[in-house]
Image (cartoon, rainbow, N blue to C red):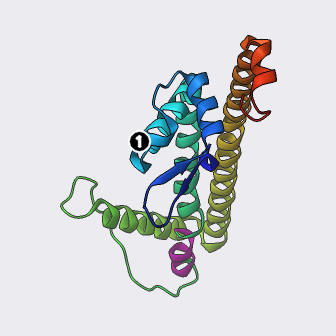
Amino acid sequence: IALACTKIPRHGKVRVNSTLLIWLNEIVGLTARPNSFTHLLFMKEFFSIMRFYLFPYKWYMVGALFFNILSAVLNVFSFVAIIPMLQLLFGIDKTRYAFIPWDADGSIKDIAVNNLYWYTTQLMEQHGPSITLFLIGMFLVTATLLKTSCYFASVGIMVPMRTGVVRDIRVNVYNKRISLPLSFFSDERKGDI
């Protein structure tokens, strides 16, 4: 669909591949003439065509977006959050941390980081460094597995949407071709379907 439109440099207007755009207009039922499109109108038409084909698959898009966001969040926490805890565990960071109540004044990020460090020091004092290192490693493995699972879930959710859109376009083209009279095929060029 993106190949249906090219920009003419000296006029700043958009030249539209009329064969493809007429085909899209007839399938979707749009009424605008192909040569009167500006770039903005073409994008409006493009989004209306995409809305026509993607609307039946909107919940697949919502699920894929959710799992992509969850994968990105878990990606940040799986490796970036582990470095300060390891510094604390191996004695590089000598700071003593105290628990801060969650409803205290201050940034929620600073409170969460402080309480995570405090929890790590509590684990080291109660169970020793080796058990704490094992638990941090298990946290890293679990976060990586969750991140990878969310990524594959988002990719897997997108499969029915991609194949469904292609199927819908093919069905519309087939229905359009068989609905045309025989005289159309003898009078028109081969590409003007």
Residue at 69% over, 52% down: 148
| Amino acid type of the residue tagged 1 in the rendering | Leu
Residue 101: give x, y in percent of width and height: 27, 56
Residue 95: give x, y in percent of width and height: 39, 83
Q: Is residue 82 magenta?
A: yes
In what element is the residue under mark 1? Answer: helix
Q: Does the magenta stretch include residue 77?
A: no
Res. 127 image quadrant: bottom right
- Magenta segment, which residues? 81-88
Q: Which of 97 and 79 is in front in this view?
A: 79
Q: Can residue 45 be seen in this view?
A: yes
Res. 25 image quadrant: top right
Q: Which residue lies furthest to the front in this view?
A: 187
Left or right relative to 187: residue 60:
left
Residue 48: give x, y in percent of width and height: 48, 32
User: What secondary structure is the stretch in magenta mostly built from?
Assistant: helix
Look at the image and tell me in which quarter the N terminus lies: top right
Residue at 44% over, 55% down: 13
Q: Which of 104 and 30 is in front in this view?
A: 30
**Count of marks, rendered view:** 1
Left or right relative to 72: residue 3:
right
Q: Which residue lies furthest to the left in this view?
A: 105
Q: Nearer the viewer, residue 141 or 121?
A: 141
Q: Nearer the viewer, residue 96 or 109?
A: 109
Residue 9: give x, y in percent of width and height: 49, 66
Q: Can residue 59 be seen in this view?
A: no
Left or right relative to 118: residue 151:
right
Look at the image and tell me in which quarter the C terminus lies: top right
Which residue is labeled 1 in the image? Answer: 41
Residue at 58% over, 82% down: 90
